[in-house]
Image (cartoon, grey):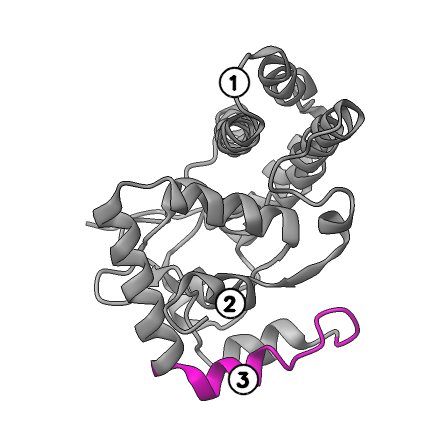
Amino acid sequence: MNIQYLSLEEIQERCEKLTNEYEIDEEKFYSIVEKWAEQDVRVEHKLIYSFTELLDVVSSEITSMEEYVGLTATCRLGCSFCCYFPIIINEMEAKFMKQAIANFPEERRKAIQSHLTNYYEKYKDQIEEVVSLDFENDADFKLKYRKTLTPCPMLNTDTNQCMAYEIRPIPCRTYMNYTNPNVCETNLMPKETISFEFLYSEYMGALNEFLQFLYEEGDTGFVQYPDDLYKHDYLVNWMKELTNLS
């Protein structure tokens, strides 16, 4: 069967149409934190539920944009080439992820901890190399990281599936391929792939506003606000705390 994939030019044209015509529904993001601000539950629950629901809104907004310009992702289950890119998040996001994982059912939580313990032992030398890359000042750090073929700590390399898929960070859920999947297999940094990472500003803007509200109320739960917003690091560094090694 001869599948006709979109060309780079066609993808660029549709992305330009998005830029010129599509308006992000900001209310979708802020309605989440407004809802949880009013709920009579523990602050920890407010934080986790708003975090996970905002991630869902990011994904649904991408779907809306795809439908608007007729884009269909060619990413498929078991395709994990993008899981070898560096993922950088702030400490607040890392705490959200770790707290969400702590709330997983015991069997799943223990499976993740066991996986991570083995991961940090297996890739010890590679991890030391990649975390030494200066992501703030080295313009080529992504390519250097990618060349090491160091998998994401949350990737099960036996199944090529994410072990925490529903709480994967913004860079993971916004990186898309709309052409032949082979471009990811044959290129470390394929030019055909695109990112909707600009949605990060809506997602983080809503979270920040929520934390400001909680801060004024006198309780930000497990988040040290605003300090956690300004500490950025590789996901591979943040997740080490979940292992038996820490």
Q: Residue at 56% across / 85% down in the picture?
A: 129
**In terms of secondary structure, where does tag 3 sit?**
helix
The residue under label 3 is: 128
Q: Residues within 10 Å of mark 3 (few under 14, many from 20)?
A: few
Is residue 9 visible in the rendered image? The answer is: no
In this picture, residue 82 sits left or right of residue 244: right
Q: Which residues are magenta?
A: 122-138
Decide: is 33 above or below 148: above
Residue 19 vs 146, above or below: the answer is above
Per the model, the C-alpha gap separating discs 2 and 1 is 32 Å
Name, please, the residue furthest toward the bottom.
125
Q: Is residue 189 above or below residue 223?
A: below
Q: Position of residue 166 (x, y in %)?
A: 39, 40
Residue under numbered circle 1: 41
Q: Nearer the viewer, residue 25 or 70?
A: 25
Number of callouts in the render? Answer: 3
Residue at left 44%, top 78%?
149
Give coordinates of residue 117: x percent, y percent. Answer: 34, 71
Q: Which residue is mark 2?
A: 236
The residue depicted at 67 percent of the width and 20 percent of the height is: 30
Question: Relative to residue 8, is residue 226 drawn left or right?
Answer: right
Report whether 90 appears left or right of 57: right
Which of the marked residues, 2 or 1, is nearer the chain's N terminus?
1
Crowd around label 1: few <14 · some 14–19 · many ≥20 (10 Å): few
Q: Image quadrant of residue 119?
A: bottom left
- Which residue extends farthest front? 218
Q: Secondary structure at mark 1?
A: loop
Q: Marks 1 and 3: CB-CB under 8 Å?
A: no
